[in-house]
Structure formats: structure tokens, C-alpha cells
Amino acid sequence: MYLLTEIRVSDFEVGVVSAQGRFKVVSPCTDAKRRESAKVFEAVSGMGGNDRKQALAGLKMLLKLAQLGKPFNQLADPKAVHEAFEPFYCELTQRKETVWRYRHGDIRILFYYAADKVVLLAHTLPKRTDKLSAKDTNQAKAAVIDFLTASRSAAGLQWIE
Amino acid sequence: MEHKPLFGDLIAAHEGLAEELKAVDVAADLTLLLHHTGKTRADLARALGWSRARVTQVLSGHENLTVQTIAAVTKALGYTFDAVFRKMGAPAAAQPWDAQASLALDMVDAPDLKEWMSRTTMKSMAGQFTGAMEFAHFDMQLDSSNHDAMFQEVACAA
């Protein structure tokens, strides 16, 4: 079973309402009973103080921009949002898939535009060098493939509220 | 469904972070306003006499913007702003682009209506969706037979 949860603007502040036409920014989870098992939450929690603050700021910016339901590269500075690495061929979809990255200071948020206005958070990491490591690239690719595989399986996706 | 903010405890653990995130909110809102007005970062830079780099910095969320900077940007975009307060947990005020995003979504599943509106209504209405609107007759069902009333109501509210 593939578990995922939507990360909302209200995950930062109570009372902020998500827009209807937004991109739904989602993170895979490992525990159906705990939203804290969201991979993005675990990644941010595991960061050091300053990185964690930047990651939270970056995620909030991404979520705010997602409210308009327009691709992030139309809204943010082109240097902040672009393809994370060369599109990779996916056997499952039989086409090239693109992972994007949003940069906020030293934080890189890698994401994938899925169907139905879903944006999958594929990897969140602090990075102080220009090039992504092979490990980080592979981790993002694997996250996309896992999501696509699950969304095509009989069991499908299980959303955690 | 209202739920506990996932990142609430992490934010609370860092003194001053909640306030820093408000600065991100402001920068994001200015970015959305820029997009809403149909202007580019280059347009904004020209209007303010700023470099592109300065615009990028202001909209990046990395800076604690002054009220003067926020006022300058909003003015250059043809808007102004107010400080609107709300109780903790109370719903946030709507922004100009919220109505537009909602309208666009509502029309996605109604291609006939979308086509009709693009032919008859939306072109002349396009400029009207940039700010707050008020319709006095909520009980009126607007359709192709009485859509002139829509213009009438907008003119009265303006």
C-alpha cells in the first residue's frame, strides 16, 4: 500500500485555507496513522537548525505559490525553479519524466508534476554544491517511479488526512 | 477538515521562525500579485527603477521587507494594501487572485459555459476580475438571457 498525504498551507499556520484550484503538494508516508511519517516531514525534522529553518521557509514558499495552480517556473525566478537533472526514461510510462527543483537558499526541494494537479515531493535536501549527487538523483527518480507504480496498481494510493 | 499543523511544533521550536515565515508569506503574495496583474519581473523592475536582481531578492522570501518596499511594489502593480488582522485560527482574508483561481476551476468541467463566456462575457469582463466585486442581487440566476444584468451590477458596485 502506497501512503501519501497532502502538505497544506495550514500545516504551517492554522486558519489558512487552501485554494480550490491549487496544485496538491503531496509527500509519501510510511504510517497510515501518522502524518508525521511523511517523508518530507522526516527529512526536514532531521536537518540541523539553520537548514531546517530554510527548508520550512522554502516549503512554505512552494506551497503558497502552489495555491494559484500554475507551474512554479511561471511564478518563481527561473534560477530558483528549473529541471533538477536530465529527464529520465521511465519504463512504466514509456516516456521521459522530469523532476524539477526549487531552490531556497541552501535547500533543494525536488518535485514531480503528476496527473490531476498533484505535485509529488520527491526529495528535500540541503545542498551547498552546484551538482546533485547520484545518490540524491536516484532517490528522486525512485520516489517518482514508486508513485507512478502505485498510482497504476490495483491497490492505488491511500491518502492520509 | 481542520487538522493539527504538521510543522507547528518544528516552527515553535525555533524562536522567531514564525515571524520569518510571515516574511515568506508576504514575498509569496507579492509574487502572486505580480502574476495576477499579468506583469513580469522586468516590468516591475522598470516601473520601480530597480535592477532585476533587486526584484528577485524582494520576491525570494529571503528578505525581511519593509512596509515602504511592500507599498512601492503594490503601487507599481496598481494596488494598495491594508494590514488585516484576524484571531489565531480564524480564516485568512481572501486575495484578489483567489476568486480568479476559483472561477477558472469552476469552468473546467463546463466546456459549453466556458465557450459561451469566452465569446460573450469574459472578454468584456476581463478587467473586472482584477479587484473585489460585489453583486447586490444574490438571488438572481445569471444566464445568457439576462447577462446584461451582470454588467449593470458591476457598474453599480464600482
Image (cartoon, rainbow, N blue to C red):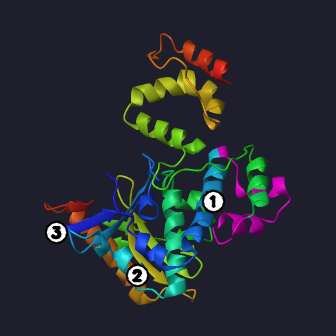
Chain containing the residue with disc 2: A
Which residue was labeled with disc 2? A45
Q: Is residue B23 above or below residue B11?
A: above
* Relative horizontal placement of residue B60, taking residue A150 as reference (left or right): right
- Percent position (x, y) of residue A95? 35, 65
What kind of element bears circle 2? helix
Residues under numbered marks 3 and 2 in contact, where contact means CB atoms less than 8 Å apart: no
Q: Which residues are magenta?
A: B37-65
Question: Which of the image's four quarters has the N terminus of chain A?
Answer: bottom left
- Comparing B124 with A27, the one in front is A27
Kindly indicate the quadrant of the structure image that contains residue B121: top right
What kind of element bears circle 1? helix
Amino acid carrying label 2: it is: Ser
Mark 2 on the same chain as mark 1 = no
Name which residue lies at 35% across and 52% down.
A116
Q: Is residue A125 above or below residue B110?
A: below
Chain containing the residue with disc 3: A
Residues under numbered marks 1 and 3 in contact, where contact means CB atoms less than 8 Å apart: no
Chain containing the residue with disc 1: B
Q: Is residue A98 visible?
A: no
User: In the rendered structure, does residue B47 fall within the stretch colored magenta?
Assistant: yes
- Percent position (x, y) of residue A36? 31, 73
Q: Which-is-in-front pick, marks 1 and 3?
A: 1
Name which residue lies at 62% across and 22% down.
B154
Which residue was labeled with disc 3? A1
What's the distance in space between the residues labelled 1 and 3, CA to CA?
Answer: 39 Å
* Numbered badge on residue B26: 1
What's the distance in space between the residues labelled 2 and 1, CA to CA?
Answer: 25 Å
Q: Is residue B2 above or below residue B57?
A: above
- Percent position (x, y) of residue B37? 67, 45
Kindly indicate the quadrant of the structure image that contains residue A87: bottom left
What's the distance in space between the residues labelled 3 and 2, CA to CA?
Answer: 24 Å
